[in-house]
Image (tube, helix red, strand yellow):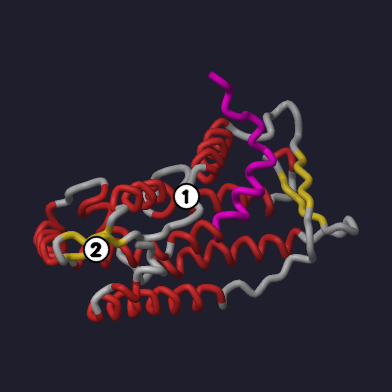
Amino acid sequence: MSEDEGLTALPEPIRERVLRLQDEVDQIVSRAQLLLTAQLPGPVSFRFVNAAPRDVLTPYERAQSISFVTRYEHLPSEYTVEVVEYEGQFYIGNMAFLRHALNEFRPLIQNQSDSVYYQNIHRVWYSMLTLDDPSQGTTIRVSDTDKRDVTPTYIRWLSEHNEAITFVLRPLDYGYLYNGILQHSDTVYSPRLLQDYTSGEFNYILWKHVLVLAFIRQMLLPYYRLIRILTFPRLGPL
């Protein structure tokens, strides 16, 4: 059964727990959305200025941009949790997919040393937007359809997306998920992991953190659109 269609078929304690979980996530996301106050004046265009002979992107920026664009393009667009019944007990039926989706987000939201970590992405492209001297690096200016410079508004708009990601991550426990079971087995989490895993609590923890991924993906979209303009290479054929 799907996440939405199957809730009514679940035993009441499980259904109530899932509804509380959904309400908790909805409240976190709703508060994060309050941070998004800047409004772009419709479609915008970008102008990149660079003083030759320097390349438009440094080797780090080029590698970062290709890696981020490639990763973003292959993120799942839906994160439905499927529930199955087996011998009177209920389990997450698509655990492998949910683990995969969470693992795909790890460099973006957890690994601060990765170039595609969302704060590192923001730092690099924010610097281009605020840089005034092309001799010091690539500068980006943003214009509306009437060719008016709206770069300050765009900077604020982009920064609010960055702040919204930070806001939703702060009360959640992705560190435990990634370092406790998904990609590492840090011994500091062993007692909690054993308890959560055998009691079934881990199902709810994973479910809760999957629910937030769609919002995080939405907040990363402006970076994808901006970076995609300068990421010329496409995956070649076989």
- 230 inside magenta stretch: yes
Secondary structure under badge 2? helix
Question: Is 228 displayed left or right of 143 in the figure?
Answer: left
Q: Is residue 225 above or below residue 174?
A: above
Instruction: Provide the residue span drawn in magenta.
Output: 219-238
Main SS class of the magenta portion in the image: helix
Percent across and percent down for residue 126 are 62, 53
Percent across and percent down for residue 161 are 57, 63
Q: Residue furthest top?
A: 238
Residue toward you, 7 or 129? 7
Residue located beneath label 1 in the image:
76
- 32 inside magenta stretch: no
Query: Label 2 to label 1, Cα distance in Å?
Result: 20 Å
Secondary structure under badge 1? loop
Q: Is residue 157 above or below residue 110?
A: below
The kind of residue tagged 1 is Pro
Q: Is residue 41 above or below residue 217?
A: below
Q: Residue at x 51, y 56 (%)?
A: 217
Residue toward you, 3 or 27? 3
Percent across and percent down for residue 86 are 18, 59
Residue located beneath label 2 in the image:
203
